[in-house]
Amino acid sequence: MTSCARVAIGDPDATRMPMRQMTPMLSALYQDRLLAEYRAPKNRRELVDATSHAERKNPVCGDAVQIMVRVERDAIADVAFMGQGCAISTASASLLTQAVAHCETASTLGLVASVGLLLGGEAVDDLPELLDPLRGAVRFSSRHSCVLLPWLALRVALTQGEATRHKRF
Amino acid sequence: MTTLAALAPRSDFPLLAAQPALHYLDSAATSQKPRAVLDAICGFYETANANPHRGAYALSAAATDAYHDARVAIARFLGVADTDCLIFTRGTTEAMNLVASSWGRTHVQAGDEIVITALEHHANFVPWQQLAKSTGATLRIVELCNDQSIDIASMREIVNEKTRVVAITHVSNAVGSITPLDEVVRIVRSRSSAVIVVDGSQAVPHLSVCFDALDVDLYAFSGHKMLGPMGSGGLIGKRALLESMPPYHFGGDMIEWVHDEDSTWNVIPHKFEAGTPNAADAVGLAAAVRYLEALDMAQVRAHELALLELADARLRAMPGVTVFGPPAAQRSGVISFAVDGVHPHDLATIFDQQGVCIRAGHHCAQPLMRRLGVSSTARASFYVYSDGGDVDALCSAVEAAQTMFAVVE
């Protein structure tokens, strides 16, 4: 028969005490530069003259991000995002818009692939320094989908995105 | 440190015993398993493993007996006098799909109304939504009060003579609110001849449930949320209703006779248990209910309520914290909350680094999240092995997250 003896009340078991300090891994994830992008994201706006757009949803948490791009002569003339998400997906989207602005479409798709490789554990050393805050997420596999959310939306927008004009999300 | 002891010793739970610093606050997703359950599963495979209902040899008879005894024990725990009326399934999701498919497709047609609530888990929402789409029936959703409890007045307005089925949760997985089932039954019975289907996956682990006293028609539950193994659970129903329903899956064990052109069906519960049954996990689930019986479900409820009231009061007193759901006394051991300026997914990551496991997300309840105006919430949930130290760790983790995100002075 199962024992139902109760644990002694007030047992000061030190190993059960809450930990209050931040681990280095966590500090690397939520580094100042990432939190700064989260608090004041760049290019979170509508892009009324977008040539294509795409939305990507994260079924795990219910977040969604929309990426809007204006492509001119095979290059990204303007890019913006909309949506509310966690610190990581928001910062990732903000950094994305800064990293790919004015880049050629082909090199942008290469950058999307590089971000995927980075999260897969590959030693990716040709990422723009601007994207360094995303490196802190590599060891948090449960958050890879947050980092990737805007990048995958961008890839869809560039490869099969719906044409848009004055579309409101 | 808060002095509220666990009801069940951590030493009974190998995973918790091996990780003393872990604060497991995600029991609404799945519970930890006591040694007694693990031993029972292992014991079945070591001493009685054969295909139940098949072989004409002693070992097969032992397997059949073990499977049958498990059904008897679980039926007793759930207040089901007619043991045959307990169908083993992989859990609530399969049970609900069984009902929507088997009963729904033979009893619901265009013009009928299907009633669910905005509180439902997707497992008790999507099957009915899809049944309505495929039959032309109308899906009607009972709305919620401001505290995310089911709006009984809305239910009175919605249930009528066209209502063929009312599918409703006993306890919300997302906010923990407890449905006043007796009142729901009175309303439905007085206004319609509808079948009442209850999602009991969050009720059976935490409250004393007696199916025969509820006067509902069908009741689903999941074993893995009540100390039992994953892939176990069941559907309970009234005999006449179950006998009138066609099989859900076809195959071995569920037939009476197979002719070239047609087949006839075995009696319940076998009619709904096609193929080799998951006997080992049924045995494990029976061990889980024996463990809960030894604890006493009244004590389980009292323990969880004490933890919930403590956590509820402390979280509500913290700046920038919003707690969802009705008052603690009307909830099971679930606390769903938000912290201003910190997304629930970020909360969960920060908590995890402090050894605190919570759920962050939509909790498979996106209709509810839309009504709350959020994409997700953070959810901590308690069980028999939770203690005051878990509440301390939860509150400490909230403070750590607020400090990291600099959202409080």
Image: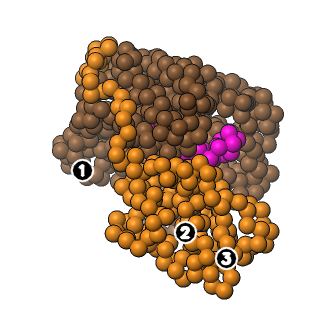
Chain colours: A orange, B brown
Outermost residue to the bottom: A73
The quarter of the picture where residue B120 lies is top right
Mark 1 Cα shell of 10 Å, populated few (<14), some (14-19), many (≥20): some
Mark 2 sits on what residue? A99
Chain letter of the residue beneath label 3 in the structure image = A
Chain letter of the residue beneath label 2 in the structure image = A
Could you tell me if residue A17 is visible in this image? yes
Stretch of the chain drawn in magenta: B358-376
Instruction: Tell me the residue at 42%/51% (across/down).
Output: A29
Percent across and percent down for residue B281 are 33, 43
Mark 3 sits on what residue? A77
Q: Can residue B239 be found in the magenta stretch?
A: no
Mark 1 sits on what residue? B50
The reply to whether the C-beta atoms of the residues labelled 3 and 2 are less than 8 Å apart is no
Percent across and percent down for residue B183 are 69, 24
Q: Is residue B261 left or right of residue B273?
A: right
Instruction: Tell me the residue at 34%/65% (across/down).
Output: A121
Percent across and percent down for residue A112 are 50, 72
The reply to whether the C-beta atoms of the residues labelled 1 and 2 are less than 8 Å apart is no
Q: Circle 1 — which element?
A: loop
Q: Is residue A29 left or right of residue A168?
A: left
Instruction: Tell me the residue at 75%/52% (across/down).
Output: B137
